[in-house]
Image: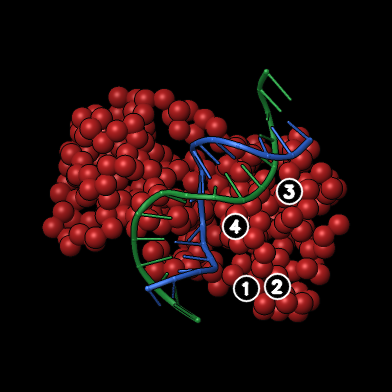
Chain colours: A red, B green, C blue
Amino acid sequence: MPELPEVETFVRALQGPMLGRTFVSVIITWPNLIRPSAAELQKKLPGLRVERLTRRGKYLQFRLSEGQTLFIHLKMSGSLTVEPAEAPLHRHVRTIFNLDNGYQLRFKDMRKFGRVHLVDDPARVTGHLGPEPLDPHFTAEDFVARCRRRSGRLKPLLLNQSFIAGVGNIYADESCFAARLHPRRRVGTFSDEALTRLYHALQKNLNAGIMLKGASIDAVYGGGQFQNHFQVYGRGGQPCPVCATPIKRIVLGGRSTHFCPRCQPEE
DNA sequence: AGTTCCACCCGCACGC
DNA sequence: TGCGTGCGGGTGGAAC
């Protein structure tokens, strides 16, 4: 379910319980999620220690001893908890990582879209990702230049992880609204100024999401508060907070898309 | 001849 | 019962 801010929230919550811990064993109840294979994870992971826990795009990245890296992608419905081994097990837990202190890292994923990767070369998993939108080295000029090399429609481009990493459906819609750009327009039709507005809108919304511990829009992930600050996402038919025109909902690139037809004119 | 774009689709649960 | 929907993204064929 998470986008960048929600994944970041998981990373921060898990750092305390996970840093310095050593994996003891792995229990796999749904092998299809594991890459390269369930057998390989069970063979290689025991004895490896968590040295760093970070995020790259929407991946959680566990830097392990012996140069190994564990990636977890939560996709639409995944979540992670650290619980005592004796705590009741939820039926949607797909992978259980036993730790050296009697606790377990539990990967729960109702829809089974998530992925677990254990690799020696991180680039095999995240090498295709575009820049981090909140990286201070990634400037507005970089963003505009990147846009100038593309020809597609705006929103599908923002959702393309090889164009920019970590942006999903909510933050794309909210950022297009904040920058007053129609999500279906071709990116080449926007001025440098418009794209610079979008760059700042993305940073502002992603940072707000992180501050509020992400958005909780269903029962799978709770605790975040960003859903209370949506301007357009999920608000089809309701008045635009700026001009009171009803928010439109369309399908774009296969995803529901929300915008104000007056604040975000097409052409 | 690549490269880019876009619809489709992958389990599952929930609400109308 | 049935259908539409979903905080993602890989795939493959179509279109530049």
- State how far apart marks 2 and 1 are (Cα): 6 Å
Considering only order in the chain, which callout, 1 or 2, is on the residue closer to the N terminus? 1
Q: Chain of mark 2?
A: A
Q: Nearer the viewer, mark 4 or mark 2?
A: 4
Between A26 and A8, the one lying in front of the other is A26
Quadrant where the C terminus of chain A lies? bottom right
Callout 3, which amino acid?
Answer: Arg
Q: Residues within 10 Å of mark 3 (few under 14, many from 20)?
A: some
- State how far apart marks 3 and 2 are (Cα): 20 Å
In the image, are marks 4 and 2 on the same chain? yes
Q: Nearer the viewer, mark 3 or mark 1?
A: 3
Does the residue at mark 2 contact the one at mark 1 (Cβ under 8 Å)? yes
- State how far apart marks 3 and 4 are (Cα): 13 Å
- For residue A145, say whether it is visible: no
Label number found at residue A255: 4
- State how far apart marks 1 and 4 are (Cα): 15 Å
Does the residue at mark 3 contact the one at mark 4 (Cβ under 8 Å)? no
Label number found at residue A247: 2
Considering only order in the chain, which callout, 2 or 3, is on the residue closer to the N terminus? 3
- State how far apart marks 4 and 2 are (Cα): 16 Å
Q: Residues within 10 Å of mark 4 (few under 14, many from 20)?
A: few
